[in-house]
Image (spheres, rainbow, N blue to C red):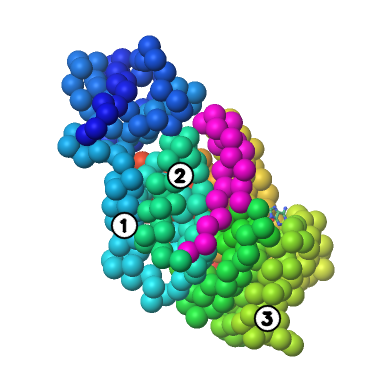
Amino acid sequence: MSEPLPLVRLKNAWNSTHPWIFQRLVEKPAQRPKPGSIVDVVGVDGVWIGRGFYNGHSRIALRMLENDPDVAVDAGWFVRKIGEAVRLRREFLKLDAIGNAWRVVHSEGDGLSGLVVDRYDDLVVVGFFSAGMYRHREWIFNALREHFPGCRFHSFADEHVQKQESFDYKDTLGTEPAIISEHGIRFRADPAGAHKTGFFADQRENREWLSRMCSGQRVLDLCCNTGGFGVYAAVRGAEEVVGIDIDPAVLEIARGNAKLNGLHGKAMPRFIQADIFPWLRDAQANGERFDVVILDPAKMTRDREQVIPALKKYLDMNKAALGVVKPGGLFATFSCTGLVSEEQFTDMLRRAAFYAGRTVQVLKVAGAGPDHPWLAQVPESRYLKAVFCRVLD
Ligand SMILES: C[S@@+](CC[C@H](N)C(=O)[O-])C[C@H]1O[C@@H](n2cnc3c(N)ncnc32)[C@H](O)[C@@H]1O
Protein backbone atom coordinates (compact mmCIF):
# COMPACT_ATOMS: atom_id res chain seq x y z
CA MET A 1 0.00 0.00 0.00
CA SER A 2 1.39 3.45 -0.86
CA GLU A 3 0.54 5.85 2.00
CA PRO A 4 -0.12 4.51 5.48
CA LEU A 5 -3.73 5.06 6.50
CA PRO A 6 -4.65 6.99 9.65
CA LEU A 7 -4.88 4.64 12.62
CA VAL A 8 -7.94 4.44 14.85
CA ARG A 9 -7.86 2.50 18.11
CA LEU A 10 -10.78 0.88 19.94
CA LYS A 11 -11.33 1.37 23.65
CA ASN A 12 -12.60 -2.13 24.40
CA ALA A 13 -12.19 -5.67 23.16
CA TRP A 14 -14.03 -6.16 19.85
CA ASN A 15 -15.03 -9.51 18.38
CA SER A 16 -18.21 -8.69 16.51
CA THR A 17 -18.76 -9.20 12.77
CA HIS A 18 -21.22 -6.28 12.59
CA PRO A 19 -19.74 -3.59 10.30
CA TRP A 20 -20.70 -0.70 12.61
CA ILE A 21 -18.59 0.35 15.59
CA PHE A 22 -20.16 3.05 17.73
CA GLN A 23 -18.44 6.24 18.89
CA ARG A 24 -18.30 5.29 22.57
CA LEU A 25 -16.09 2.28 21.69
CA VAL A 26 -13.63 4.30 19.64
CA GLU A 27 -10.73 6.39 20.95
CA LYS A 28 -10.65 9.89 19.54
CA PRO A 29 -7.60 10.09 17.29
CA ALA A 30 -5.24 13.01 18.09
CA GLN A 31 -5.49 14.13 14.46
CA ARG A 32 -9.08 13.67 13.42
CA PRO A 33 -9.43 12.25 9.90
CA LYS A 34 -12.11 14.02 7.78
CA PRO A 35 -15.59 12.43 7.95
CA GLY A 36 -15.64 9.40 5.68
CA SER A 37 -11.86 8.89 5.47
CA ILE A 38 -10.57 5.34 5.09
CA VAL A 39 -8.65 4.24 8.20
CA ASP A 40 -6.94 1.20 9.68
CA VAL A 41 -8.57 0.02 12.90
CA VAL A 42 -6.67 -1.64 15.74
CA GLY A 43 -8.05 -3.22 18.88
CA VAL A 44 -7.38 -2.11 22.44
CA ASP A 45 -4.36 -4.48 22.33
CA GLY A 46 -3.01 -2.77 19.19
CA VAL A 47 -3.77 -5.77 16.95
CA TRP A 48 -5.07 -4.86 13.46
CA ILE A 49 -8.80 -5.52 13.10
CA GLY A 50 -9.77 -4.15 9.73
CA ARG A 51 -10.15 -1.21 7.43
CA GLY A 52 -13.14 1.05 7.03
CA PHE A 53 -14.67 4.53 7.00
CA TYR A 54 -14.15 6.76 10.03
CA ASN A 55 -16.58 9.51 10.94
CA GLY A 56 -15.88 11.35 14.20
CA HIS A 57 -19.16 13.29 13.83
CA SER A 58 -21.44 10.27 13.54
CA ARG A 59 -22.83 7.91 16.19
CA ILE A 60 -21.54 5.19 13.87
CA ALA A 61 -17.88 6.15 14.13
CA LEU A 62 -16.59 3.24 12.06
CA ARG A 63 -18.09 1.36 9.13
CA MET A 64 -15.89 -1.64 8.53
CA LEU A 65 -15.28 -2.63 4.91
CA GLU A 66 -12.30 -4.98 4.69
CA ASN A 67 -10.79 -7.53 7.05
CA ASP A 68 -7.87 -8.76 4.96
CA PRO A 69 -4.77 -6.70 5.84
CA ASP A 70 -3.33 -7.29 2.36
CA VAL A 71 -6.30 -5.77 0.54
CA ALA A 72 -6.41 -2.01 0.05
CA VAL A 73 -9.75 -0.19 -0.02
CA ASP A 74 -9.18 1.81 -3.19
CA ALA A 75 -10.84 2.45 -6.56
CA GLY A 76 -10.21 -1.16 -7.60
CA TRP A 77 -11.78 -2.43 -4.37
CA PHE A 78 -15.03 -0.63 -5.26
CA VAL A 79 -14.98 -2.07 -8.80
CA ARG A 80 -14.62 -5.59 -7.36
CA LYS A 81 -17.13 -5.16 -4.55
CA ILE A 82 -19.81 -3.60 -6.77
CA GLY A 83 -18.96 -6.31 -9.33
CA GLU A 84 -19.80 -8.99 -6.73
CA ALA A 85 -23.13 -7.28 -6.06
CA VAL A 86 -23.92 -7.13 -9.79
CA ARG A 87 -22.97 -10.82 -10.21
CA LEU A 88 -25.34 -11.80 -7.40
CA ARG A 89 -28.23 -10.12 -9.24
CA ARG A 90 -27.28 -11.15 -12.78
CA GLU A 91 -25.68 -14.58 -12.53
CA PHE A 92 -27.03 -16.01 -9.28
CA LEU A 93 -30.52 -14.50 -9.10
CA LYS A 94 -30.84 -14.15 -12.91
CA LEU A 95 -32.78 -10.92 -12.53
CA ASP A 96 -32.19 -9.86 -16.15
CA ALA A 97 -34.73 -12.50 -17.14
CA ILE A 98 -37.36 -10.83 -14.93
CA GLY A 99 -36.75 -7.18 -15.64
CA ASN A 100 -34.41 -4.26 -15.89
CA ALA A 101 -35.22 -2.59 -12.56
CA TRP A 102 -33.39 -3.95 -9.53
CA ARG A 103 -31.38 -2.90 -6.52
CA VAL A 104 -27.70 -3.14 -7.43
CA VAL A 105 -26.27 -2.47 -3.96
CA HIS A 106 -28.14 -2.87 -0.69
CA SER A 107 -25.71 -1.26 1.76
CA GLU A 108 -24.52 -3.61 4.54
CA GLY A 109 -26.26 -6.52 2.78
CA ASP A 110 -23.63 -6.21 0.05
CA GLY A 111 -20.75 -5.25 2.36
CA LEU A 112 -20.98 -1.58 1.33
CA SER A 113 -22.22 0.20 4.45
CA GLY A 114 -24.06 3.41 3.56
CA LEU A 115 -24.44 2.88 -0.18
CA VAL A 116 -27.71 2.13 -1.96
CA VAL A 117 -27.82 1.81 -5.74
CA ASP A 118 -30.84 1.03 -7.91
CA ARG A 119 -30.84 0.59 -11.67
CA TYR A 120 -33.78 1.38 -13.87
CA ASP A 121 -32.79 0.35 -17.37
CA ASP A 122 -30.00 2.82 -18.29
CA LEU A 123 -30.63 5.04 -15.26
CA VAL A 124 -28.50 4.29 -12.19
CA VAL A 125 -29.75 5.93 -8.97
CA VAL A 126 -27.15 6.30 -6.23
CA GLY A 127 -28.11 7.05 -2.60
CA PHE A 128 -25.42 8.13 -0.14
CA PHE A 129 -26.21 7.05 3.43
CA SER A 130 -22.73 7.54 4.91
CA ALA A 131 -20.07 10.24 4.71
CA GLY A 132 -17.57 7.60 3.55
CA MET A 133 -19.59 6.65 0.49
CA TYR A 134 -20.20 10.30 -0.29
CA ARG A 135 -16.48 11.09 0.09
CA HIS A 136 -15.53 8.32 -2.34
CA ARG A 137 -18.33 8.99 -4.78
CA GLU A 138 -16.04 9.35 -7.81
CA TRP A 139 -14.69 5.81 -7.25
CA ILE A 140 -18.28 4.61 -6.94
CA PHE A 141 -19.49 6.35 -10.10
CA ASN A 142 -16.47 5.00 -12.01
CA ALA A 143 -17.07 1.46 -10.74
CA LEU A 144 -20.74 1.68 -11.74
CA ARG A 145 -19.76 2.98 -15.19
CA GLU A 146 -17.65 -0.15 -15.65
CA HIS A 147 -20.55 -2.42 -14.78
CA PHE A 148 -23.25 -0.43 -16.59
CA PRO A 149 -21.50 1.04 -19.65
CA GLY A 150 -23.25 4.12 -21.04
CA CYS A 151 -25.50 4.51 -17.96
CA ARG A 152 -26.96 7.82 -16.72
CA PHE A 153 -26.74 8.79 -13.04
CA HIS A 154 -29.13 10.32 -10.56
CA SER A 155 -27.82 10.71 -7.01
CA PHE A 156 -29.20 11.88 -3.69
CA ALA A 157 -28.56 12.02 0.05
CA ASP A 158 -31.43 12.34 2.52
CA GLU A 159 -31.32 15.48 4.62
CA HIS A 160 -31.37 13.55 7.91
CA VAL A 161 -28.39 11.49 6.69
CA GLN A 162 -26.45 14.62 5.74
CA LYS A 163 -27.09 15.98 9.23
CA GLN A 164 -26.19 12.77 11.07
CA GLU A 165 -23.12 12.06 8.96
CA SER A 166 -22.08 15.69 8.61
CA PHE A 167 -21.80 16.28 4.89
CA ASP A 168 -23.58 18.48 2.32
CA TYR A 169 -24.90 17.14 -0.91
CA LYS A 170 -27.23 18.53 -3.54
CA ASP A 171 -29.32 15.88 -5.25
CA THR A 172 -29.14 15.65 -9.04
CA LEU A 173 -31.80 17.85 -10.60
CA GLY A 174 -33.80 17.39 -13.77
CA THR A 175 -33.20 13.67 -14.28
CA GLU A 176 -35.17 12.26 -17.23
CA PRO A 177 -37.26 9.24 -16.24
CA ALA A 178 -36.55 5.70 -17.45
CA ILE A 179 -39.10 3.18 -18.71
CA ILE A 180 -38.56 -0.14 -16.97
CA SER A 181 -40.18 -3.51 -17.26
CA GLU A 182 -40.59 -6.27 -14.68
CA HIS A 183 -42.51 -9.52 -15.16
CA GLY A 184 -43.62 -8.10 -18.52
CA ILE A 185 -45.23 -5.00 -16.97
CA ARG A 186 -43.94 -1.52 -17.71
CA PHE A 187 -43.46 1.47 -15.42
CA ARG A 188 -41.94 4.89 -15.56
CA ALA A 189 -39.19 5.23 -12.95
CA ASP A 190 -38.96 8.92 -12.25
CA PRO A 191 -36.60 9.97 -9.45
CA ALA A 192 -37.34 13.63 -10.14
CA GLY A 193 -41.14 13.22 -10.07
CA ALA A 194 -41.89 10.62 -7.40
CA HIS A 195 -40.18 8.77 -4.56
CA LYS A 196 -36.50 9.75 -4.53
CA THR A 197 -35.26 6.55 -6.12
CA GLY A 198 -38.09 6.74 -8.67
CA PHE A 199 -39.65 3.33 -8.18
CA PHE A 200 -40.13 0.69 -5.47
CA ALA A 201 -38.24 -2.30 -6.86
CA ASP A 202 -38.46 -4.00 -3.44
CA GLN A 203 -42.09 -5.03 -3.98
CA ARG A 204 -41.49 -6.74 -7.36
CA GLU A 205 -42.04 -10.34 -6.20
CA ASN A 206 -44.97 -9.34 -3.96
CA ARG A 207 -46.67 -7.52 -6.86
CA GLU A 208 -46.18 -10.56 -9.06
CA TRP A 209 -47.53 -13.02 -6.47
CA LEU A 210 -50.55 -10.94 -5.56
CA SER A 211 -51.47 -10.05 -9.13
CA ARG A 212 -51.93 -13.76 -9.90
CA MET A 213 -54.86 -13.72 -7.45
CA CYS A 214 -56.57 -10.69 -8.98
CA SER A 215 -58.19 -11.96 -12.17
CA GLY A 216 -61.90 -11.06 -12.20
CA GLN A 217 -61.59 -9.39 -8.78
CA ARG A 218 -62.43 -5.96 -7.40
CA VAL A 219 -59.10 -4.60 -6.17
CA LEU A 220 -58.30 -1.68 -3.85
CA ASP A 221 -54.69 -0.44 -3.79
CA LEU A 222 -54.25 1.80 -0.74
CA CYS A 223 -51.18 4.10 -0.74
CA CYS A 224 -50.72 3.06 -4.35
CA ASN A 225 -47.86 5.48 -5.20
CA THR A 226 -47.13 5.14 -8.95
CA GLY A 227 -49.61 2.28 -9.22
CA GLY A 228 -47.34 -0.73 -8.66
CA PHE A 229 -49.87 -3.24 -7.30
CA GLY A 230 -52.88 -1.68 -9.04
CA VAL A 231 -51.37 -1.72 -12.54
CA TYR A 232 -50.20 -5.33 -12.10
CA ALA A 233 -53.69 -6.32 -10.96
CA ALA A 234 -55.33 -4.58 -13.93
CA VAL A 235 -52.92 -6.16 -16.43
CA ARG A 236 -53.63 -9.58 -14.90
CA GLY A 237 -57.36 -9.19 -15.49
CA ALA A 238 -58.85 -7.56 -12.39
CA GLU A 239 -62.46 -6.58 -12.98
CA GLU A 240 -61.98 -3.20 -11.33
CA VAL A 241 -59.02 -1.44 -9.70
CA VAL A 242 -59.16 1.59 -7.42
CA GLY A 243 -55.88 3.18 -6.30
CA ILE A 244 -55.68 5.76 -3.51
CA ASP A 245 -52.76 8.02 -2.67
CA ILE A 246 -52.43 11.36 -0.94
CA ASP A 247 -49.80 12.66 -3.38
CA PRO A 248 -51.19 13.98 -6.70
CA ALA A 249 -47.77 13.87 -8.41
CA VAL A 250 -47.39 10.10 -8.03
CA LEU A 251 -50.97 9.54 -9.26
CA GLU A 252 -50.17 11.32 -12.54
CA ILE A 253 -47.33 8.84 -13.03
CA ALA A 254 -49.67 5.98 -12.01
CA ARG A 255 -52.15 6.97 -14.76
CA GLY A 256 -49.29 7.11 -17.24
CA ASN A 257 -48.14 3.67 -16.09
CA ALA A 258 -51.60 2.22 -16.73
CA LYS A 259 -51.51 3.66 -20.28
CA LEU A 260 -47.97 2.34 -20.82
CA ASN A 261 -49.46 -1.13 -20.37
CA GLY A 262 -52.25 -0.53 -22.84
CA LEU A 263 -54.96 -0.33 -20.18
CA HIS A 264 -58.01 1.67 -21.17
CA GLY A 265 -61.78 1.78 -20.77
CA LYS A 266 -63.10 -0.49 -18.03
CA ALA A 267 -59.67 -2.05 -17.49
CA MET A 268 -58.16 1.34 -16.61
CA PRO A 269 -57.58 1.64 -12.83
CA ARG A 270 -59.25 4.60 -11.15
CA PHE A 271 -56.59 6.58 -9.28
CA ILE A 272 -58.04 8.86 -6.63
CA GLN A 273 -56.20 11.50 -4.63
CA ALA A 274 -57.23 11.15 -0.98
CA ASP A 275 -56.06 10.49 2.54
CA ILE A 276 -56.87 6.81 3.14
CA PHE A 277 -58.39 7.46 6.60
CA PRO A 278 -61.41 9.59 5.58
CA TRP A 279 -61.68 7.70 2.28
CA LEU A 280 -61.94 4.35 4.09
CA ARG A 281 -64.42 5.77 6.60
CA ASP A 282 -66.73 6.85 3.75
CA ALA A 283 -66.21 3.63 1.79
CA GLN A 284 -67.04 1.55 4.87
CA ALA A 285 -70.15 3.62 5.55
CA ASN A 286 -71.29 3.34 1.91
CA GLY A 287 -70.95 -0.45 2.01
CA GLU A 288 -68.10 -0.56 -0.53
CA ARG A 289 -66.36 -3.96 -0.38
CA PHE A 290 -63.38 -5.33 -2.31
CA ASP A 291 -62.12 -8.85 -3.06
CA VAL A 292 -58.48 -7.80 -2.73
CA VAL A 293 -57.17 -4.95 -0.57
CA ILE A 294 -53.53 -3.84 -0.57
CA LEU A 295 -52.16 -1.51 2.12
CA ASP A 296 -48.59 -0.31 1.57
CA PRO A 297 -48.07 2.92 3.56
CA ALA A 298 -44.90 5.00 3.67
CA LYS A 299 -42.22 4.57 6.35
CA MET A 300 -43.64 5.82 9.65
CA THR A 301 -40.51 6.65 11.63
CA ARG A 302 -36.77 6.22 11.97
CA ASP A 303 -36.83 7.24 15.65
CA ARG A 304 -36.82 4.43 18.22
CA GLU A 305 -38.92 6.61 20.55
CA GLN A 306 -41.68 6.79 17.94
CA VAL A 307 -42.22 3.05 17.40
CA ILE A 308 -45.27 2.89 19.71
CA PRO A 309 -47.11 5.75 17.93
CA ALA A 310 -46.14 4.18 14.59
CA LEU A 311 -47.67 0.86 15.66
CA LYS A 312 -50.83 2.74 16.69
CA LYS A 313 -51.05 4.30 13.23
CA TYR A 314 -50.53 0.89 11.59
CA LEU A 315 -53.27 -0.47 13.84
CA ASP A 316 -55.71 2.26 12.87
CA MET A 317 -55.09 1.96 9.14
CA ASN A 318 -55.13 -1.84 9.10
CA LYS A 319 -58.36 -1.90 11.10
CA ALA A 320 -59.94 0.58 8.66
CA ALA A 321 -58.68 -1.35 5.62
CA LEU A 322 -59.98 -4.67 6.99
CA GLY A 323 -63.41 -3.05 7.16
CA VAL A 324 -63.69 -2.94 3.35
CA VAL A 325 -62.50 -6.50 2.57
CA LYS A 326 -65.27 -8.86 1.42
CA PRO A 327 -65.69 -11.99 3.54
CA GLY A 328 -63.30 -14.52 2.01
CA GLY A 329 -61.28 -11.72 0.40
CA LEU A 330 -57.55 -11.22 0.29
CA PHE A 331 -55.71 -8.60 2.35
CA ALA A 332 -52.05 -7.74 1.70
CA THR A 333 -50.51 -5.48 4.30
CA PHE A 334 -46.97 -4.09 4.37
CA SER A 335 -44.61 -2.17 6.62
CA CYS A 336 -41.40 -0.62 5.39
CA THR A 337 -40.50 0.83 8.82
CA GLY A 338 -37.21 -0.88 9.68
CA LEU A 339 -37.67 -0.29 13.41
CA VAL A 340 -40.94 -2.27 13.44
CA SER A 341 -40.10 -5.97 13.64
CA GLU A 342 -42.01 -8.72 11.86
CA GLU A 343 -43.26 -9.93 15.25
CA GLN A 344 -44.53 -6.47 16.19
CA PHE A 345 -46.17 -6.11 12.81
CA THR A 346 -48.00 -9.46 12.93
CA ASP A 347 -49.05 -8.71 16.50
CA MET A 348 -50.45 -5.37 15.32
CA LEU A 349 -52.40 -7.30 12.68
CA ARG A 350 -53.82 -9.61 15.37
CA ARG A 351 -55.08 -6.56 17.25
CA ALA A 352 -56.40 -4.86 14.09
CA ALA A 353 -58.36 -8.02 13.23
CA PHE A 354 -59.76 -8.16 16.76
CA TYR A 355 -60.92 -4.54 16.72
CA ALA A 356 -62.30 -4.88 13.18
CA GLY A 357 -64.21 -8.02 14.26
CA ARG A 358 -62.65 -10.07 11.43
CA THR A 359 -60.90 -13.45 11.38
CA VAL A 360 -57.61 -13.15 9.58
CA GLN A 361 -55.93 -16.26 8.18
CA VAL A 362 -52.27 -15.58 7.34
CA LEU A 363 -51.26 -17.24 4.06
CA LYS A 364 -47.74 -16.01 3.62
CA VAL A 365 -45.22 -13.71 5.26
CA ALA A 366 -42.56 -12.23 3.00
CA GLY A 367 -40.27 -9.27 2.59
CA ALA A 368 -38.36 -7.39 -0.06
CA GLY A 369 -37.07 -9.15 -3.16
CA PRO A 370 -33.74 -11.02 -3.08
CA ASP A 371 -31.93 -8.03 -4.60
CA HIS A 372 -32.36 -6.46 -1.11
CA PRO A 373 -30.23 -8.97 0.83
CA TRP A 374 -29.27 -8.56 4.48
CA LEU A 375 -26.53 -10.20 6.47
CA ALA A 376 -27.67 -12.39 9.35
CA GLN A 377 -25.52 -10.31 11.70
CA VAL A 378 -27.01 -7.02 10.42
CA PRO A 379 -30.78 -7.37 10.76
CA GLU A 380 -31.08 -3.55 10.65
CA SER A 381 -30.96 -3.66 6.85
CA ARG A 382 -34.12 -5.73 6.73
CA TYR A 383 -37.02 -3.31 6.51
CA LEU A 384 -39.97 -4.54 4.43
CA LYS A 385 -42.52 -6.85 6.03
CA ALA A 386 -45.26 -8.31 3.84
CA VAL A 387 -48.24 -10.26 5.17
CA PHE A 388 -50.76 -11.82 2.79
CA CYS A 389 -53.94 -13.05 4.40
CA ARG A 390 -57.51 -14.09 3.84
CA VAL A 391 -60.26 -12.41 5.76
CA LEU A 392 -62.53 -15.34 6.53
CA ASP A 393 -65.72 -13.71 7.75
C1 LIG B 1 -44.27 2.77 0.08
S1 LIG B 1 -45.21 3.82 -0.99
C2 LIG B 1 -46.22 2.64 -1.84
C3 LIG B 1 -45.50 1.88 -2.95
C4 LIG B 1 -46.37 1.16 -3.92
N1 LIG B 1 -47.19 0.15 -3.29
C5 LIG B 1 -45.58 0.54 -5.07
O1 LIG B 1 -45.52 -0.70 -5.17
O2 LIG B 1 -45.01 1.30 -5.85
C6 LIG B 1 -46.25 4.67 0.15
C7 LIG B 1 -47.25 5.67 -0.41
O3 LIG B 1 -48.15 6.00 0.64
C8 LIG B 1 -48.67 7.31 0.38
N2 LIG B 1 -49.34 7.78 1.61
C9 LIG B 1 -48.79 8.03 2.81
N3 LIG B 1 -49.74 8.40 3.71
C10 LIG B 1 -50.93 8.34 3.06
C11 LIG B 1 -52.28 8.60 3.46
N4 LIG B 1 -52.59 8.95 4.71
N5 LIG B 1 -53.24 8.44 2.54
C12 LIG B 1 -52.94 8.08 1.28
N6 LIG B 1 -51.67 7.82 0.84
C13 LIG B 1 -50.68 7.95 1.73
C14 LIG B 1 -47.43 8.07 -0.05
O4 LIG B 1 -47.81 9.22 -0.80
C15 LIG B 1 -46.68 7.00 -0.89
O5 LIG B 1 -46.95 7.16 -2.26
Q: Secondary structure at mark 3?
A: helix
Q: Please, what is the three-letter code of the amino acid marked with disc 2? A: Arg
* Image x and y of residue 131, in percent: 48, 35
- The reply to whether the residue tagged 3 has its Cβ within 8 angstroms of ligand 1 is no
User: Which residue is denoted by mark 2 in the rendering?
Assistant: 137
* Image x and y of residue 230, in percent: 63, 72
Mark 3 burial class by Cα count in 10 Å: few <14, some 14-19, many 20+: some
* Image x and y of residue 220, in percent: 67, 70
Picture quadrant where residue 381 is located? top left
Q: Secondary structure at mark 2?
A: helix
Residue at the (56%, 83%) spot, across then down:
236
Q: Earlier in the sequence, mark 2 or mark 3?
A: 2
Residue at the (42%, 75%) spot, across then down:
98
Q: Is residue 370 visible?
A: no
Mark 1 burial class by Cα count in 10 Å: few <14, some 14-19, many 20+: some
Which residue is at the front of the view, 229 or 34?
34
User: Which residue is denoted by mark 3 in the rendering?
Assistant: 259
Mark 2–mark 3 Cα distance, whole angstroms, equals 37 Å
- The reply to whether the residue tagged 2 has its Cβ within 8 angstroms of ligand 1 is no
**Residue, far front:** 2
Q: Quadrant of the N terminus?
A: top left
In the rendered structure, which segment of residues is drawn in magenta? 151-172
* Image x and y of residue 189, in percent: 59, 66
Residue at the (57%, 73%) spot, across then down:
179
Mark 1–mark 2 Cα distance, whole angstroms, equals 16 Å
Residue at the (29%, 68%) spot, across then down:
91
User: Which residue is denoted by mark 1 in the rendering?
Assistant: 83
Q: Secondary structure at mark 1?
A: helix
Q: Earlier in the sequence, mark 1 or mark 2?
A: 1
Picture quadrant where residue 61 is located? top left
Asked if the residue under mark 3 is in contact with the one under mark 2, i.e. CB atoms within 8 Å, the reply is: no
Picture quadrant where residue 64 is located? top left
